[in-house]
Image (cartoon, coloured by chain):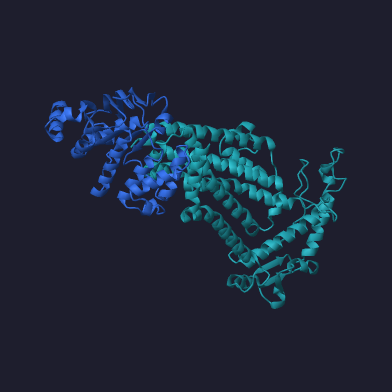
Chain colours: A cyan, B blue
Amino acid sequence: MKKIAAIIKKDLKRYFNDPRILVSLFLPGIIIFVIYSIIGGIIGDMTDLSDEEYTVYTLNLPEPLASLFTPEGMNVHLVDAAERGLGDEAVLEEIHEGKVSVYVKFDENFKENLNLWLLGQLAQNSPTDGAQTPTDPSQTPADNTPQDPADEPSGQPTPAPAVPQVKIYYDSSDVGSLALYNVYASALDALEDGLSNLFDVNGGNETFDLAEVETAADIMSAFMPMIMIVFLWSGAMMISAESIAGEKERGTMATLLATPIQRSHIALAKAVSLSVPALISSMCSFAGLMLSLPGLMPGVTLAHYGFGEYAALFLLNAVTTVMFTVILTVVSTLSRSVKEASGYSSALMVGIMVVGMANSIAPETASPAAFLIPVFGAGRCYSQIMSLSFNPLSFAITIAASLFYIAVGVFALSRLFSNERVMFGK
Amino acid sequence: MNQAAVVCKDLEKSFRLSKKQQKIEKTPDRVKRAVRGLSFEAYPGEIFGLLGSNGAGKTTTLRMIATLIKPDGGSVEILGKDAVAFPDFARSNLGFLTSELKLEDYFTPNYLYRYFSELHGLDENADRKRMLFEKFGIDKFAEVRVADLSTGMKQKLSLVISLVHDPAVIVFDEPTNGLDVITAKAVTDYLGELKNEGKAIIISTHIFSLAEKLCDRIGIIVDGRMAALSDKQTLVGDRSLEDVFFDIYSMAAPAET
């Protein structure tokens, strides 16, 4: 054990006293945090409409709906196009020129049309409506809406009267215009739903706000596995890829092999010493990513996840990183030069990314055996944890499988260190 | 004579050649027989020299003795124990130096001495370290990183590191290669001291003057075979080692060479 410790101590001393290696360990996490925060800031600025003043032209705007078009937090100036004596073409030209953000055009007699339409809806959904009440099959279609000429004698539901129209003209290349369109479209959709719905879902003042957390978690779970797997692989690759190949190339491995230490002990020592910086790097990347998420995705906070989730993520990160380190160390050992090792590692990274991406196309309900697949299992576990649907069985299988692959990798390493063709072959 | 410290018996070693190596060696053969039935012994208190041209099989033989590679046939015994069966025992009792074995540039002589002592399962012996460092002039550079040492100083440090565990058997491959005359003399003088301490020393060289000066017994390897093996006086007589070597070489070398 003293000899293993000596190798680990020596390697760590080298890694942690070499400024280049230190920078390569911590820099990715810092870069991730900075870049993602900047991106989040830019997105935030682009969508921050509070400081701007927007002119919105309206036509035939029903008075009770005016408040929908002046949302809180936005400085919107409503102008009646008819009062200004402007026709459609003139208004649209002003939108093109950027003078006006949006033009909302209601049908003439919108209110009356709307009332008619609502009456039609009520008639359609009346309990005496034969088409809607299978308990009364003797009703003829004519009993429903006799005024509608489009009614078919086949028993099809009666079409509603002409739906009142609202047209919103906007310019999607203008951030403010696009944002206002989205706000208005959402508000009108909500209004329409409120008018036509026949029953309330989640009515009243009770809080049903579970969806917001789930949505944020879903977004994170969709892209986190891939990103995390790439980060972990990159973190492990920075040192492991060139480790043994570099030592072989420089002749320092032969010096080590000439000392009375068992090959299996060298393999174990190398796996441990290479895993430490890889773990630090991966944890930095993970921390950088998590810390940047609130800025990147509004509504996402670190408090979405509890201690259990973070502990599971930590363990999954650690085991996956060590597994990647061992794989890369095996690749490095098999390589005859640093250049060759880097080439193989980069090629493998593509494979790792493909398996990582398989998470998004594989069925949601993967069989437990699927978690035995390296990388795939880890990716799926990330997904489950991030979407707050942690599955202890899947997690346990993934961790156990990863530990098994690590053991196999260390065993393979010790065999490779005993293989003179591998260690001394030119 | 004492019991042999190193016994090599019928050593055989072949290597598969890559296409590139075949091209370099100008041979259609996929396998190169580097060592063919080599047998010799090295005794405590003597310097045994393996003399041969480049590619004769000297380094391969020394690597088998140092347990870096395994023989395909035959055996190596170090202090009475089979080196293949007990590689750690062999390595614990053997100091191996070759130009292929390098030290990490990042570390200082002081650190490396301590590190290799630990790998040999020893606590650092400060007196021995001081003696070796002073003998080879490393003491002034004990805290200088290897990367910043001169080539000669690196070579001397490698020699010192190979001897941290005070081994009974010393195997040096081309010990004065790349050294200036002053450093080369320091190394050869120290080999003489080690011999007087009773160490069994095997060196490989293609420098006749070195072999003539240092070795008690000499084995001449030609194309992986032991072409001649004798004590220096019997082998050379009143001729020069160089003349004797070329006579033996011309008789033993394959026709194509």
Q: Is residue A303 left or right of residue B93?
A: right
Find residue A237 and report its horizontal and vertical position in percent: 48, 46
Residue B89 makes an appearance in the image: yes
The residue that appears at 58% across and 61% down in the rendered structure is: A39
Q: Is residue A268 above or below residue B1?
A: below
Taking the view exactly as shown, the residue that stands out farthest to the bottom is A84
Q: Quadrant of the C terminus of chain A?
A: top left
Find residue A171 and report its horizontal and vertical position in percent: 61, 65
The residue that appears at 80% across and 63% down in the rendered structure is: A112
Nearer the observer, A425 or B100: B100
Nearer the observer, A137 or A170: A170
Q: Is residue B181 left or right of residue A228?
A: left
Find residue A113 and report its horizontal and vertical position in percent: 78, 61
The residue that appears at 40% across and 40% down in the rendered structure is: B164
Q: Is residue B33 left or right of residue A217?
A: left
Q: Is residue A327 above or below residue B109?
A: above
Residue B222 makes an appearance in the image: no
Nearer the observer, A244 or A184: A244
Find residue A102 and report its horizontal and vertical position in percent: 66, 68
Quadrant of the rendered image containing residue B250: top left
Quadrant of the rendered image containing residue B52: top left
Q: Is residue A25 left or right of residue B168?
A: right
Nearer the observer, B211 or A143: B211
Marker count (numbered): 0
